[in-house]
Image: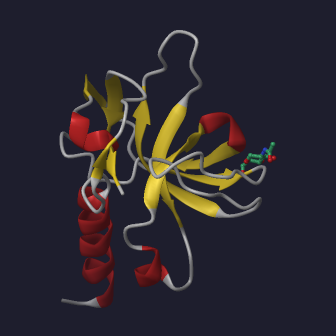
Amino acid sequence: MDKSSGLIFLFISVGYLCHMANSALMEKLANKKICADEDCSYVISMAQALEDYIALDCRFINLRRGQMIYVYSKLKPQEGAGVFWCGSVYGDRYVDQMGVIGYFPSNYVNETHVFQKKTAEMATTDMDFFCA
Ligand SMILES: *[C@@H]1O[C@H](CO)[C@@H](O)[C@H](O)[C@H]1NC(C)=O
């Protein structure tokens, strides 16, 4: 495997682990989500954190202002709730970030690059909110 196909494989694996790496069933944040494919394994877009965000619980990830984030899925907002996206922070030590995937409020980020214009809407499952 050359370097670029290795990286693509990593994206796919990380995306797949998005909701499976941890171990407690949490309340669903939404009933519908938008992904690039039915496994939500492709990166939809890159976004940059506009402000620091502190994770509320294990479903979420911390963001630091200026950090770049890979976006894997976007929850469809429920009435009266915020808009949350699922992603991981891009880092130089990328492998260390594996498993550090979770939700953050979309209004804390600026979407800078959209990779997947075609997206599909589907139901969320309990596994989407399963964590430690
Ligand atoms: C969002 O990103 C775009 C493209 O990189 C940039 O031009 C714009 O200034 C950014 N907006 C904010 C609020 O940082």
Residue depicted at x 38% and y 44%: 116
x%, y% of residue 80?
58, 11
Q: How is the image coloured?
A: secondary structure
Quarter of the image with the N terminus is bottom left
Residue with the most extreme bottom position? 2
> Is 94 or 129 nearer to us in this picture?
129
Left or right: 70 with respect to 6? right
Q: What residue lies at 38% left-to-right and 73% top-to-bottom? A: 98
The quadrant in which residue 29 appears is top left
Whether residue 36 is visible: no
3 relative to 87, above or below: below
Q: Please, is residue 99 above or below residue 59 in the view?
A: below
Which residue corresponds to the image point at 40% horizontal and 37% vertical from the top-left?
117
Give the image location of residue 104, x and y in percent: 57, 44
Judge whether 37 appears above or below 9 on screen: above
Which one is in front, 49 or 101?
Answer: 101
Return the x and y of residue 58 as percentages of the image width and height. Answer: 46, 52
